[in-house]
Amino acid sequence: MKSYGEMPVLAAKGATGIGTPIFVGMATEIKIHLATASSASGTVKFAGSDSDDLPDFSAAKSPTNKWDYIEVIDNEDGTAIDGDTGVTLAGTDDHRNFTVNVDALKWFNAEITAWVAGAWTVTVIPYEESR
């Protein structure tokens, strides 16, 4: 597999809001690393789009702003986490790894939708299968 390297989406973010969108159109698989500090409490959701144009992840989804929250698989135990649910922590820092089923995904982002405390860091590593 060819790795495109680790790309930061959220860097020690301590508030609600979106991260930096990443183009992942070349990837056949995406790994996500979530790390928190300072007794993190809140929810992070992962978002994606198959649109050729970069969507505005901070604006409402629409026929012209095509994006949605996406399911991820927890690499610890294989549990699927619904995109609309996201990953919630309650005062406990964690380091988690997830996999995304790309299904023609072109753009990836993360959003802290409910923040109470802590610093949230999300990085992604897009991979491409060797042929």
Image (cartoon, grey):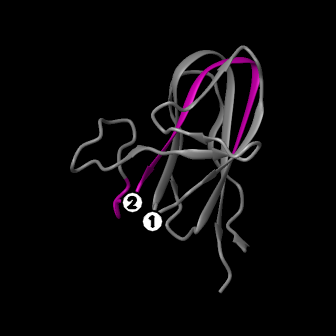
Where residue 86 sits, quadrant-wise, is: top right
Query: Quick one: SS at disc 2?
Result: loop
Q: Relative to 2, is 16 above or below?
A: above
Depth check: give the residue in front, 34 or 38: 34
Camera-side residue of 7 and 50: 50
Residue furthest out toward the bottom: 131
Query: Residue 70 location, x and y as percent?
Result: 48, 45
Mark 1: give few (<14), some (14-19) or many (20+) Cα within 10 Å.
Answer: some
Callout 2 touching callout 1 (CB < 8 Å): yes
**Range of the magenta residues?**
33-54
Q: Nearer the viewer, residue 77 or 86?
A: 77
Q: Identify the secondary structure beneath mark 1.
A: loop
Q: Position of residue 128 (x, y in %)?
A: 63, 73
Disc number at residue 116? none
Q: Main secondary structure of the magenta part?
A: strand
Q: CA distance from mark 2 to mark 1?
A: 6 Å
Residue that badge 1 annotates: 104
Q: Residue at x 71, y 62 (%)?
A: 5
Residue count near mark 2 (Cα–Cα under 10 Å), binned few <14, some 14–19, many ≥20: some
**In the rendered image, which residue does mark 2 sit on?**
50
Q: Is residue 95 above or below residue 115?
A: below
Residue at (69, 46) in percent of width and height: 78
Amino acid carrying label 1: it is Ala
Question: In the image, what residue occupies the spot 49% across and 39% down?
Answer: 83
